[in-house]
Image (cartoon, rainbow, N blue to C red):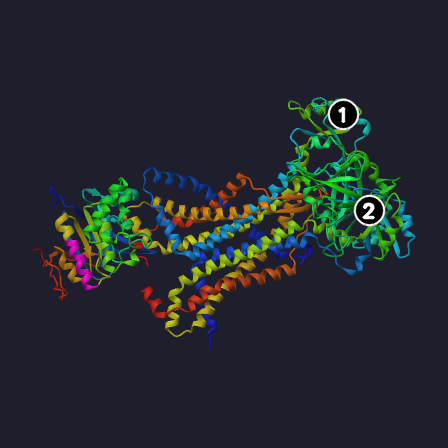
């Protein structure tokens, strides 16, 4: 028969007996777990690839020889003639900056069909209509609009680098992202505004069945401009894989955190158990069994770990936001770091597991005390 | 949970905790800062008057509680290891790129270009360039002026199953003078014969891409190219490049020159070159940049990012380590209360106890830190590949440990030991003798 | 009495009050005490009588709340913490009930501790430590750790440590409290020698009537006041016989 309620109170009392030490331990766990959350979120957010099958119809055409070569815009006509191809749009990387040379975000100059190829840039129909009507119009993601406080109708002036000069644009539409992985910090402008008589395109985006890719490449294989067509997914994956070194490093760091967590908690629990020696001995003397003592120590461990988890989770969202801001300042672009259910589960599970491992030795030792010796040592 | 959908109270909690944390952190740092003169004065007094508690006492006491000491030391070592490794990674990127440049070289790029790959230089501008002030010449009197064509190609990886498994690499079409403008450490095989499809590749590419080996054949721009030499550029960005004859490559890629690299005389400098460029209307669109600067600038953002990440993570980690040290030292003091009281009774002053315990904490941290730094130094042999938005091509980097870095990380370890040991040591020094002497 | 007639230890109107939160507990109440140089006195009293506090004030590890404490001509009440520490290292030797040796140091290193505070060469120190260890009969145990010694041996190391700087005053807090009869007798005999041969002033707090008998004078204290002025002990080492209660008259 386990007296549970009184034991619960006892655990609380014991933990609070040395408030300073308990606080330190909770902080240690909380802070370490926070680091873990930040790192894991960084890894999972590094590239959020939309693995939605229905999106495999988004293809990207580029010059086969080099990623820095351009295509002819007129190639789109030939591509449209292939069965299975639904839409083709030219695309230019505008690569300008806003106010400050360091302030850069994704700026794409595209044609109308682009938004049928990529329907995830969702904006209200009347806004989209306004955007299509205005050659100097701009479509902006809501993250970007929030960041710079832009409202519909605002004048946004970009300074071009590849396309020299100042480019004043009218904000006509703001899009939400369809899913978490959509980049909500892009700015779209009209291809024709940037290059009215333009013959070139950095990339040609195509909405077609994945099998069309090979057909497109076959079409241009022996011309001046051979192409390589692959799905957008595949391109993103490649980019992500090229940072694999850094990602591996981050994962290793996250694993090390686990180790530190176990050690810190173990340290704290060992000390706690030692301090409570007198209490445990007395309890044993009056009849509690060793498994009760075991439960006590484990309970205290979980208590500390639990508080640490709560602390870490409470502070995580704000920390991630601050971190994202720091990254933006450093690397430019926009970073979106949000807590993910999977990461949280992993973190909580890890903390509890660490707690178990950390408490195991002190718990074992405490439960095996020889009462007589313990009491004598104290007397 | 996504950002836009975070419940509103997370902001409140976060703000509250954030403020508390900020206050606590500032207080903590303030305490540390203020403590330094306090401790310093007392430590000096103890040393000057020769009234320190023998170090052997601290060392043996640490050894007595072996498990606890080792646990704390392990945590400290891990934190220092991570910090050192991350900084070595960042320094490695910076070092690899910065040392790609020759201190006496100047790169001429189109002023609108972001980097080599988007720059164009007209061949008609070349003769005028030959008259720039300070241009060095080789023994035969030829100017050390290297026009280069740089292009990015896609190279499939060695043994790739998927045609999409590969990376972007830089191809540099050069004239023979390039080998003098960019001196190499060594060459296995031979230089390419002008007018042929022969190429030399950097040593970092060997074995990693299809055909990238001496005698192998690489395929790009719809042609096959024979690898006749492997260059050793001393672990710089050039070690990840492919070089061939510009006269053959330019028509193949249908491109002209991208940049021109000049080697200047000892006494010459960039400013004079820039001035000369500005004065000539044909050349005014060209920008002169010191080669070392050019390459280093490419690494800035990424290095900054890695250092930022590393620092934030380490700061967070170090809290754990400091708290661990704190716990340990408190436990040490608690266990040695009677000894400390006795030492005080015998005549050791409070400042002797303070310095002694602090020294114990710091020494433990330094020892653990040394292990961490040493372990990190073992990474020095490792290399890794990165493609960044700045470089666009895949470059191989190494980890780089400098003496300054090692000492800095060691110092950080000592700081953690100090921070963790300060409060326990201070409290121990103020234990009332009467009670301490009778503690159990 | 010292050469010019003033007592070695002199307490005048000494009180000590301990504050526990809001409560004040008076431990010593207006105590007057005079101890001549070269005396060997025992202080006895029930638990909580203030006897240990008295010892602490005399040895300089505690401060009085009121009154004056003068030892060897020095007014302890006016000295700073650091000054008291300096004074103790040269003029006081401590003997504790539980020996209070540093577990990680050898017997030699333990005895050497007070000497580290005096400016001496390593050779000089070694000589003095060896002399002290010889005096207590433990020269062959100099490199042993406390855990390798018996209780009696540990206390002897404690005594060696207490005399190594040749202090004039030795304070002992229940020196035989943790020892069996035989070891206790040895310790007491040692103390007696220190007093008679080396002229050390010894003040000892004890429960043990036999130990008290080794002293020249027994003072009793209860509820913070000295009950009697001190009665002479019957001298000679006690041998476990029932303790004779001293009525408290000066011989």
- Neighbourhood count class around disc 1 (C-alpha, 10 Å): few under 14, some 14–19, many 20 upward: many
Given residues B15 and A16, the one toward you in this image is: A16
Estimate the x, y position of residue A2 in percent, counting from the top left: 47, 75
User: The N terminus of chain B lies in which quarter of the figure?
Assistant: bottom right
Which numbered circle lies on residue B129?
1
Q: What x and y, as percent, mark residue A332?
A: 69, 43
Where residue C192 sits, quadrant-wise, is: bottom left
Q: Secondary structure at mark 2?
A: loop
Q: Chain of mark 2?
A: A
**Residue under numbered circle 2:** A64
Q: Is residue B341 left or right of residue A336?
A: left
Describe residue C24's horizontal placement relative to residue B185 as left or right.
left
* C230 horizontally vs C179: left or right: left
Q: Residue C134 at what x, y percent from top left?
A: 20, 50
Q: Is residue C188 magenta?
A: yes
Q: Position of residue A284 (x, y in %)?
A: 39, 71
Taking the image as drawn, is residue A127 in sight?
no
Q: Is residue A196 above or below residue B72?
A: above
> Magenta stretch?
C180-192
User: Could you tell me if residue A343 is visible in this image?
Assistant: yes
**Dominant SS type (magenta):** helix
């Amino acid at each position: 028969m386990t007296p549970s309620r009184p034991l619960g109170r006892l655990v609380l009392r014991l933990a609070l007996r040395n408030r300073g030490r308990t606080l330190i331990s909770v902080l240690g766990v909380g802070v370490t777990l926070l680091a873990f959350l930040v790192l894991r979120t960084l890894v999972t957010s590094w590239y959020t690839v939309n693995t939605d099958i229905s999106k495999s119809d988004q293809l990207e055409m580029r010059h086969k020889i080099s990623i820095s070569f351009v295509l002819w815009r007129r190639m789109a006509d030939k591509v449209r003639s292939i069965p299975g191809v639904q839409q083709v749009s030219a695309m230019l990387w505008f690569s300008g900056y806003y106010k400050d040379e360091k302030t850069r975000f994704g700026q794409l100059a595209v044609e109308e069909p682009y938004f049928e190829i990529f329907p995830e840039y969702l904006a209200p129909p009347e806004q989209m209509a306004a955007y299509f009507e205005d050659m100097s119009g701009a479509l902006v993601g809501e993250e970007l609009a929030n960041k710079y406080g832009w409202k519909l109708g605002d004048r946004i002036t970009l300074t071009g680098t590849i396309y020299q000069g100042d480019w004043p644009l009218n904000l006509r539409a703001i899009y939400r992202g369809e899913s978490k992985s959509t980049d909500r910090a892009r700015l779209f402008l009209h291809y024709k505004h940037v290059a009215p008589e333009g013959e070139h395109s950095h990339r040609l985006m195509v909405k077609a069945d994945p099998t069309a890719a090979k057909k497109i490449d076959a079409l241009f294989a022996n011309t001046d401009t051979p192409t390589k067509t692959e799905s957008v997914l595949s391109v993103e994956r490649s980019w992500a894989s090229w940072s694999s070194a850094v990602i591996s490093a981050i994962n290793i760091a996250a694993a090390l955190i686990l180790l530190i967590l176990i050690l810190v908690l173990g340290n704290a629990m060992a000390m706690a158990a030692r301090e409570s020696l007198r209490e445990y001995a007395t309890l044993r003397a009056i009849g509690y069994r060793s498994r009760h003592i075991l439960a006590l120590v484990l309970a205290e461990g979980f208590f500390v770990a639990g508080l640490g988890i709560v602390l870490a989770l409470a502070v995580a969202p704000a920390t991630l936001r601050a971190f994202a801001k720091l990254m933006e300042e450093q690397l430019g672009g926009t970073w979106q770091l949000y807590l993910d259910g999977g990461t949280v589960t992993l973190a909580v599970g890890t903390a509890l597991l660490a707690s178990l491992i950390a408490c195991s030795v002190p718990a074992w030792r405490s439960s095996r005390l020889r009462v007589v010796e313990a009491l004598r040592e104290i007397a | 949970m996504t950002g836009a959908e975070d419940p509103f109270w997370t902001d409140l909690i976060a703000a509250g905790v954030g403020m508390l944390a900020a206050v606590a952190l500032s207080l903590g740092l303030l305490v540390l800062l203020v403590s330094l003169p306090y401790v310093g004065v007392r430590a000096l007094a103890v040393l000057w008057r020769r009234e320190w508690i023998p170090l052997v006492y601290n060392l043996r006491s640490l050894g007595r509680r072996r498990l606890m000491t080792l646990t704390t030391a392990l945590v400290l070592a891990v934190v220092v290891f991570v910090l050192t490794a991350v900084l070595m990674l960042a320094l490695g990127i910076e070092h690899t790129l910065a040392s790609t440049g020759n201190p006496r070289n100047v790169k001429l790029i189109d002023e609108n270009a972001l980097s080599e790959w988007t720059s164009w230089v007209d061949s008609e501008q070349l003769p005028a360039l030959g008259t720039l002030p300070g241009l060095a010449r080789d023994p035969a009197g030829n100017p050390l002026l290297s026009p280069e064509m740089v292009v990015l190609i896609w190279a499939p990886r060695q043994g790739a199953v998927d045609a999409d498994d590969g990376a972007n690499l830089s191809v540099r079409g050069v004239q023979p003078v390039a080998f003098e403008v960019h001196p190499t450490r060594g060459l296995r095989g031979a230089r390419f014969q002008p007018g042929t499809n022969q190429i030399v590749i950097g040593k970092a590419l060997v074995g990693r891409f299809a055909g990238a080996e001496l005698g192998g054949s690489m395929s790009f721009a719809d042609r096959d190219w024979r690898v006749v030499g492997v260059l050793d550029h001393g672990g710089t960005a050039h070690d990840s490049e492919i070089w061939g004859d510009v006269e053959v490559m330019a028509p193949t890629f249908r491109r002209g020159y991208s940049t021109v690299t000049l080697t200047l005389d000892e006494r010459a400098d960039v400013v004079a070159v820039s001035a000369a460029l500005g004065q000539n209307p044909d050349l005014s669109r060209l920008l002169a940049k010191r080669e070392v600067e050019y390459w280093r600038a490419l690494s800035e953002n990424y290095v900054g990012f890695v250092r930022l990440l590393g620092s934030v993570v380490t700061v967070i980690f170090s809290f754990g380590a400091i708290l661990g040290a704190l716990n340990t030292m408190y436990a040490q003091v608690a266990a040695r209360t009677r000894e400390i009281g006795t030492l005080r009774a015998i005549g050791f002053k409070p400042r002797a106890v303070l310095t002694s315990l602090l020294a114990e904490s710091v020494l433990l941290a330094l020892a653990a830190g040394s292990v961490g730094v040493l372990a990190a130094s073992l990474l020095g042999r490792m290399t890794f590949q990165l493609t960044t938005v700045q470089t666009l091509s895949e470059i191989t980097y190494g980890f780089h440990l400098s003496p300054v870095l090692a000492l800095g990380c060691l110092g950080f370890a000592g700081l953690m030991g100090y921070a963790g040991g300060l409060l326990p040591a201070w409290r121990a020094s103020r234990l009332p003798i009467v009670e301490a002497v009778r503690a159990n | 009495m010292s050469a010019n007639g003033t007592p070695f230890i002199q307490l005048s109107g000494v009180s000590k009050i301990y504050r526990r939160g809001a409560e004040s507990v008076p431990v010593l109440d207006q105590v007057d005490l005079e101890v001549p140089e070269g005396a060997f006195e025992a202080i006895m009293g029930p638990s909580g009588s203030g006897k240990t506090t008295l010892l602490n004030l005399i040895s300089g590890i505690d401060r009085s709340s009121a009154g004056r404490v003068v030892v060897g001509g020095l007014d302890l009440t006016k000295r700073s913490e650091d000054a008291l520490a300096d004074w103790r290292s040269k003029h006081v030797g401590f003997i504790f009930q539980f020996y209070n040796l540093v577990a990680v140091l050898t017997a030699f290193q333990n005895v050497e501790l007070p000497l580290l505070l005096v400016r001496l060469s390593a050779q000089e120190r070694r000589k003095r430590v060896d002399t002290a260890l010889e005096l207590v009969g433990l020269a062959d145990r100099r490199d042993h750790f406390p855990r390798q010694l018996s209780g009696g041996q540990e206390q002897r190391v404690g005594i060696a440590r207490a005399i190594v700087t040749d202090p004039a005053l030795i304070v002992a807090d229940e020196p035989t409290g943790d020892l069996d009869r035989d070891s206790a007798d040895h310790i007491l005999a040692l103390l007696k020698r220190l007093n008679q041969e080396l002229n050390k002033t010894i003040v000892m707090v004890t429960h043990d009537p036999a130990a008290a008998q080794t002293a020249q004078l027994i003072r009793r204290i209860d509820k913070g006041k000295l009950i009697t002025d001190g009665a002479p002990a019957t001298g000679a080492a006690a041998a476990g016989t029932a303790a004779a209660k001293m009525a408290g008259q000066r011989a």
